[in-house]
Amino acid sequence: MLRTNTCGELTAKSTGKTVTLAGWCHSRRDHGGVIFIDLRDRYGLTQIVLDPSHNKKVHETGEHIGREWVVAAKGKVRHRPKDMVNGNLKTGEIEVIVDELSIVTKAAVPPIEIDDRIEASEDMRMKYKYLDLRRPIMQQRLMTRHKAAAAVREYFDKNGFIEIETPMLVRSTPEGARDYVVPSRVHPGNFYALPQSPQLYKQILMIAGFDRYFQLAKCLRDEDLRTDRQPEHTQIDFEISFVDENDVMVFVEGLYRHIWKEVIGAQIKTPFQVLTYAEAIEKYGIDKPDLRFGMELVDVTAVVKKSEFKTFGVEERVKCVVAEKDLSRNEIDELIAWAKENGAKGLAWMKVTDKGLESSIVKYFSSTIQKQLLQLTKAKKGSVLFFVADEEKKAADVLGKLRLELGKRLGLMRGNEFKFCWVVDFPLFEWNKDENRWEAAHHMFTSPKPEHIGLLEKEPGKVLGRLYDLVLNGTELGSGSIRINDPELQERVMKVIGLSHEAAEKKFGFLLEAYKFGAPVHGGMGIGFDRTVALMMGLHDIREVVAFPKNKKAESPMDGSPSEVEERQLKELHIKTDVVKKNE
């Protein structure tokens, strides 16, 4: 070995030991002719000392060392002087007086600082990712990710699951996000797709009798990016035979209890709260509610429609959220502007004072109606009531967003608090106005509730699915369902969303054929692993826990992807780019 120890393990117990360390020069300080170097590797920092009175040759070599040079040093461990002990480091009580020093490689002056206290711009971090990843905080995040992956595998293994890899080159079935497609050289004009998820294959594995499958699967989707999305992400993917919804949910609660305990030593409370989709929309205006704070939405339509305030339209629903803090007029005006930018036609408000309700619109509300409002909303003195009037879904959506914005502004979203919940009983279908057709709300392989099967052809909008979403602090971690295992029922669901028998056979014939040979009742989930790790660490941008993420344009500034390919490659694939070039 070129080193005997890492830069993060030597302590006072190592005093007197001769060691060889290797790493990067984190910093170099010359104090009165004696050079001190903080040597860094992923395990930590150790101070090494180049003293000319101890070894002149070593000192001369050290005079030329710059930041991020890679060096190896051999010497003896000794106690630091008491006034130089660094209590923030595991190695802070000791230093190594160097007898031999060698330069492994020199380094150019780094364009970004390898220092957690100085964060470079996003563009610079992405371009010099290998330097960004040297920062201790980034190495800590990726080590936490590793521990989480190990905990996931441990939990599945002890529960009898088999880890099975599913294909990365699959048949294109563009029903959700756009596929990334891969041309086939040996089948001109034909394409593979990169998997958006292993959905069909894990169902095939249940039909094959594997009973309990899992993998940490790469999923690739050509969709618009945001902080919790990447073109490729990692999913905790699993499927179980002979289960119902409750079985899957209890299993997942155990998984998260295990991850939190093993990785960050925290206990999370189970069972998780369960909300129906209708309850979530009614109380929080969103199907992934943040339960770290209250401020539930209140439907005040019946009360305010008795007032003389005619701005609230006759056909509109009026919903209210109570900000449990006194806000200045400037803050209220900012929120009104924010609400309009986020889809509200307007935002009415009233403030609760010693004298009752106050605002420019209070005069349109009788004292009786004001009293009813206070009783209904349970608003206390110092609170502000905000009202949105619109069609029911729109009013809930806008006010749900406002509730979250208030939560941020009022400091109610604590990063070290973990509020999990399940959202169940989603509609199986949703109406696509643009295409004038029904489409699957989650995916078309979800089983309808048994009591709703008879409504499939008559009233698809009333059909609820055997669905369950896992939510943490207002972020959807994953979705799952009990799958359809009857080919006739599967074809009925496909027909509702406009897939004819011929089209279904063409796209999903292999699955429908497999069903004919006996399929167990089965269910599972796809859970965002990147999101799980990020939220566990109090982060919201999953790029902070991914080693080589893409930027907002789905580009990698470090390696220059996506890039053009040689004309020879295109010819082999029977592809012409003339149309693309013309459009550009």
Image (spheres, rainbow, N blue to C red):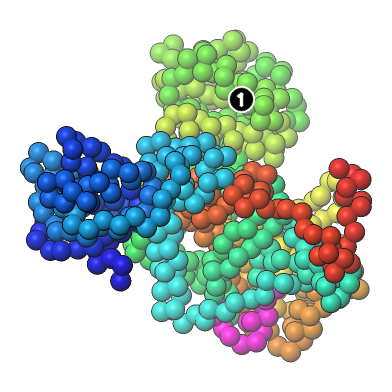
- Where residue 108 sits in the image (x, y, percent)? 46, 44
Q: Nearer the viewer, residue 56 or 497?
A: 56
Q: Quadrant of the C terminus?
A: top right
Callout 1 amino acid: Trp
**Looking at this rendering, what residue extends furthest in the bottom direction?**
517
Q: Which residues are magenta?
A: 200-213
Q: Nearer the viewer, residue 53 or 41?
A: 53
- Where residue 114 sits in the image (x, y, percent)? 40, 43
Badge 1 local density, few (<14 within 10 Å), some, or many (20+)?
some
Q: Quadrant of the N terminus?
A: bottom left
Name the residue located 72 percent from the left edge and 69 percent from the top edge: 445
Name the residue located 76 percent from the left edge and 31 percent from the top edge: 315
Side of 334 relative to 414 (left or right): right
Residue 144: in sight, yes or no? Answer: no
Residue at disc 1, secondary structure: helix
Residue 570: in sight, yes or no? Answer: yes
Residue designated by label 1: 338
- Where residue 419 sits in the image (x, y, percent)? 43, 50
Name the residue located 55 percent from the left edge and 73 percent from the top edge: 215
Q: Nearer the viewer, residue 332 or 89?
A: 89
- How many numbered marks are there? 1
Q: Is residue 524 above or below residue 39?
A: below
Locate residue 469: give its quadrant. bottom right
Locate residue 218: give its quadrant. bottom right
Q: Is residue 64 magenta?
A: no
- Where residue 574 sits in the image (x, y, percent)? 89, 67
Q: Is residue 263 above or below residue 536?
A: below
Name the residue located 75 percent from the left edge and 27 percent from the top edge: 314
